[in-house]
Image (spheres, rainbow, N blue to C red):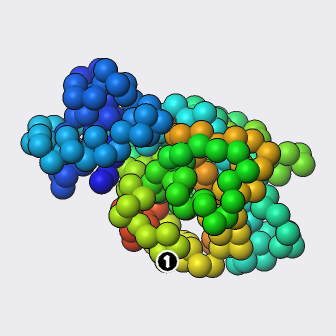
Amino acid sequence: MRLISFNHGGKDSYGVVNDDRVLDLGPLLGDRAPDLKSLIAGDLLQAAARAAESHAPTLDLAALTLLPVIPNPGKIVCIGLNYGEHVRETGREITENPTMFLRVPESQVGHGQDIVRPAESHRLDYEGEIAVVIGRGGRRISEADAWGHIAGYACYNEGSIRDWQVSTSQWTAGKNFYRTGAFGPWMVTADEIAPGQRMTLVTRLNGQEMQRATTDMMIHGIPRQIAYISAFTPLAPGDVIVTGTPGGVGNKRNPQVFMKPGDVVEVEVDAIGVLRNGIRDE
């Protein structure tokens, strides 16, 4: 299934995407699960699948305002420096354990919404990534069990304000400006993507390819990320892990490339779809 969170007529809801139509699950499952996060937490993905089989979709996808796939995650854990080419272009060394930082939900927008360049800086950079949505929570999850804890996958643009990111030893500010990242367009459930399936990630800016990588190029694979994170904090349903960006970021190009108003940025993952956003000034 492809599952989205959306706003329609001023009301937030969630649903199943079928081509260009959407089945609104709110009226059907809202008494048990008011949003997508609670659907996952309630182990109701199969109930959603049954609803999609027995009810015709009634909403036009193009008429909806898409929200970040999980608008209200408990945690967004981002993995840095997880592709060799990106490590090399930053002049750093590969580390034994994953580099990580946190994002806040307010730093995200959904598919089709504008990423916002803040007044404080024009050094707004793209980072195409794959997001993992946790389905079954746990603490000290083993790598062998990790695939069974995934609800699904989405595209992610981990937008960064580079001068704020590098102005101190901590990356938090540069990675969390309001509405600088994007999460979407939907979550593809894990039953449609095999454990360890090789996925191809491509980032395009105004139609020009800027990044390309495959998941087998990750330094720390998805099971390793889940095991490492869950060693120090319990993972919960609806938590999001953003798995790292490959080489080709704008900040390390010569000349540098930063996103500006009027640009269109796309993050495509072959097994998921295309996350597309415009850029505007705040």
Q: Quadrant of the N terminus?
A: bottom left
Q: Residue at x 78, y 77 (%)?
A: 88
Image coordinates of residue 105 in percent, x first then y, are 58, 34
Q: Is residue 137 visible?
A: yes
Residue 85 position, x and y percent, is 70, 78
Which of the 4 image quarters holds residue 96? bottom right
According to the image, label 1 marks what residue?
198
Kind of residue sitting beneath label 1: Arg
- Give the position of the C terminus as an image quadrant: top right
- Which of the pair 265/145 is nearer the observer? 145
Q: Residues within 10 Å of mark 1 (few under 14, many from 20)?
A: some
Which residue is found at the position 31% from the left and 46% from the top? 46
List x then y, in percent, for residue 264: 43, 56
Instruction: Kindly identify the residue that appears in the image at 43 percent across and 70 percent down.
Output: 194
Residue 168 placement, left or right of 118: right
Q: Quadrant of residue 65?
A: top left
Residue plotted at (30% across, 24% down): 30
Circle 1 SS class: loop
Asked if residue 221 is positioned above or below residue 145 in the image, the reply reads below
User: Residue 29 location in percent, x, y?
Assistant: 28, 29
Q: How many labels sit on residues?
A: 1
> Which is more toward the observer, 118 or 136?
136
